[in-house]
Amino acid sequence: MTTKSAAAAARATVYGHPRQGRGRELKKAIEGYWKGRVTADALRTTAAELRRTHWRQLAGAGVHEVPTGDFSYYDHVLDTTVMVGAIPARHRETVAADALDGYFAMARGTQDVAPLEMTKWFDTNYHYLVPELGPDTVFTADSTQQVAELKEALALGLTARPVLVGPVTYLLLAKPAPGVAADFDPLTLLDRLLPVYAEVLADLRAAGAAWVQLDEPALVQDRTPADLNAAARAYRDLGALTDRPKLLVASYFDRLGDALPVLAKAPVEGLALDFTGPAAANLDGLAAVGGLPGKRLVAGVVDGRNIWVNDLEKSLTTLGTLLGLADRVDVSASCSLLHVPLDAAAEKDVDPQILRWLSFAKQKTAEITTLARGLSQGTDAIAGELAANRAALASRAASPITRNPAVRARAEAVTEADSRRSRPYAERAAAQRAHLGLPLLPTTTIGSFPQTGELRAARADLRAGRIDTAGYEERIRAEIQEVVSYQEKAGVDVLVHGEPERNDMVQYFAEQLDGYLATRHGWVQSYGTRYVRPPILAGDIARPEPMTVRWTSYAQSLTAKPVKGMLTGPVTMLAWSFVRDDQPLGETARQVALALRDEVADLEAAGTSVIQVDEPALRETLPLRAADRPAYLDWATEAFRLATGGVRPDTQIHTHMCYAEFGDVVQAIDDLDADVISLEAARSHMQVARELAAHGYPREAGPGVWDIHSPRIPSAEEAAALLRTGLEAIPAERLWVNPDCGLKTRGWPETRASLENLVAAARTVREELSGA
């Protein structure tokens, strides 16, 4: 399809690589440092070894230009905050005393100082630390990390390209700092920020960088004319610099739309564009602006966010079309490989037939280098790879694993009535209050309690055969007894069983549902040192038997207080999995919803009066472009209602969401028709309570008063103050008191202290409301 001369310059590259290491060495070293078992020097040594290993693996696989600056101890946006000197005032003293401890304090907080707010990176399950800016922010360049990592790679004899968060995206991701007017626009600081980027670019050039990549994924969202003008001005000014490397501006996750002509005209040497999924529209957009004459195009034709093998022939067709639209075309993944696991070959327990369908970071790198060779040397040079790829694609398409006729027939038979409660909310609320008998400002938790080392060891012992099922289950029963007993003593009103038997809120269910595939080593970073193993949605979904009834019923047998049944909702089951790409997401969501509907029915029949169906990913999965959102929200909210719509009026349905911009989905939250919603609110200072009030949200809500992603213990006075702020927006008869999220990642000492303070705060505010 191409001749050797037509694409001789095509080379392979990637935007970023998973950070953790094959054995999650980075996680272990960082957590060891926090606990005082690992020195700072040992942590830095581990990090440097991981970087060298990753770069050498990439170069050995045929990647011509390795990325630097994609590595992070916690988060690359936080690294950018350090690079531009935007340290919040409350953290400056700690950062000045010890840069590493100050860095982690910004990420996690301390007992005395709150961390930066954390939210989702666009529509992924990766969390970033939100920059806090204001009109008084002074930026100062600190390129220490970026220069040092570049020099490390160059010292290995590698061609390296530093990767930075671009200035426009950095400002668009930022929020007004505490005490700054809510309507302050961080983008007004662009002219103040650009000289700092100019200084960093000069430092990188002096250190040996030929190219620097500036990531601008925020430009794939709907942007105002002012935003686009800011982007044009930013790259006009940076492009005009004389002391700089060549600039490669990258976007990913969706199509650029109106931002594409802005970047195409900018005086930069190259663009890196996504050509997968909805971003395939970038191909037509590029043709419409006349291509990139005289410039480099890095074409993201391998999906960097999912784990299915690439269709090499389809990608080669796209690349062949792009050859006529740029001076040079190189090949990459659609985005950083941070969002996929390391190596599918490590999955020894996966059926070999299915394993050939999977492509993790190592396999994607091979796909990228294969495509670059095919583009440069012609398809004959990769004939063997093309034949193997065709066979893998055909195997998956023809496999009976992917289709269950009974599941499809049931999904097609769903009616509108199936996704509606039998009574309106007002009638349900009255029935639930009478049935549950809860006090004003009822207290509860989100579901999980600390996953101790003993619990993880028990699961490992069961897998390894060191204990039998009976021994393992005795350990789980003992943990549930302890959790229930503690909650009763603490005075919590609606209890949970603590989820000691669950490894992960998605994986636990995936392992019990037909159609899902669990991995053993498929770790992906969610935030900081929190890694998850997203299951793989390989076929049609069915529930062979009840998944949660046994342990929920056991917990309920230990107390007269209501115990919540805890389930993960259909959208989150998709969002935190690697989903199938051979059918619309809405169809898959309906299948998951029907499986959960059966579980909800069984919980209710077993006497569970409160059932929580968590949907923390509802906002996360919201399409980046407004035009694509109505269709998504239609099937997403319908799936939740389908899962929960069959219960009696006096059964109370809860849902939970965390760490997202809830204002974008308030109507969808309303459309879920849950009786109670709990949401993250502590780091964002009850912003969500105000958003619900502005919308006129009519149901009960629990905006969190305890930030569980920080080790600090909130005082009873602090929690009470947040409750009072919540009461300014939500009436007392509809306000719940709860943490931001589950307690799985916290230790027992801080859990006890914080939960007791939460209950005390609720008691204090109740007394204030009653006039006692």
Image (cartoon, helix red, strand yellow):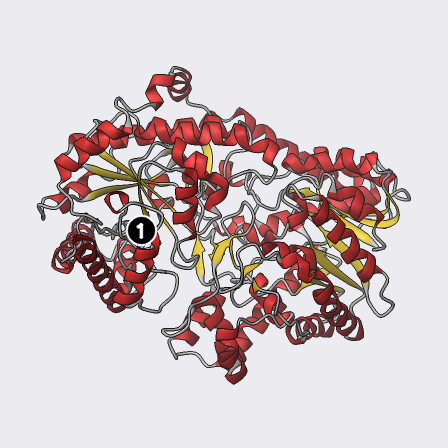
Q: Position of residue 384 (x, y in %)?
A: 71, 39
The residue that appears at 26% across and 48% down in the rendered structure is: 736
Decide: few, some or many residues near mark 1? Use Cα within 10 Å; few <14, some 14-19, many ≥20.
some
Q: Helix or strand or loop: what does disc 1 sit on?
A: helix
Task: Please say whether residue 238 is visible from this viewpoint.
Answer: yes
Q: Position of residue 757 (x, y in %)?
A: 23, 64
The residue that appears at 62% across and 44% down in the rendered structure is: 253
Q: Which is nearer the eye, 583 or 133?
A: 133
* Rendered-image quadrant of the N terminus: top right
**Image check: 760 left or right of 726?**
left
Q: Which is nearer the eye, 512 or 659?
A: 659
The residue that appears at 45% across and 67% down in the rendered structure is: 115
Q: Which is nearer the eye, 586 or 400?
A: 586
**Image check: 466 left or right of 384?**
left
**Image check: 690 left or right of 630?**
left
- The residue at the far bottom in this view is 97
Q: Which is nearer the eye, 322 or 734?
A: 734
Task: Please say whether residue 11 is visible from this viewpoint.
Answer: no
Q: Position of residue 173 (x, y in %)?
A: 59, 55
* Rendered-image quadrant of the C terminus: bottom left
**Residue where numbered disc 1 is placed:** 727
The residue that appears at 25% across and 29% down in the rendered structure is: 426
Amino acid carrying mark 1 in the image? Leu
Q: Is residue 648 above or below residue 18?
A: above
**Image check: 408 left or right of 399?**
left
Q: Position of residue 652 (x, y in %)?
A: 23, 35
How many marks can you see? Answer: 1
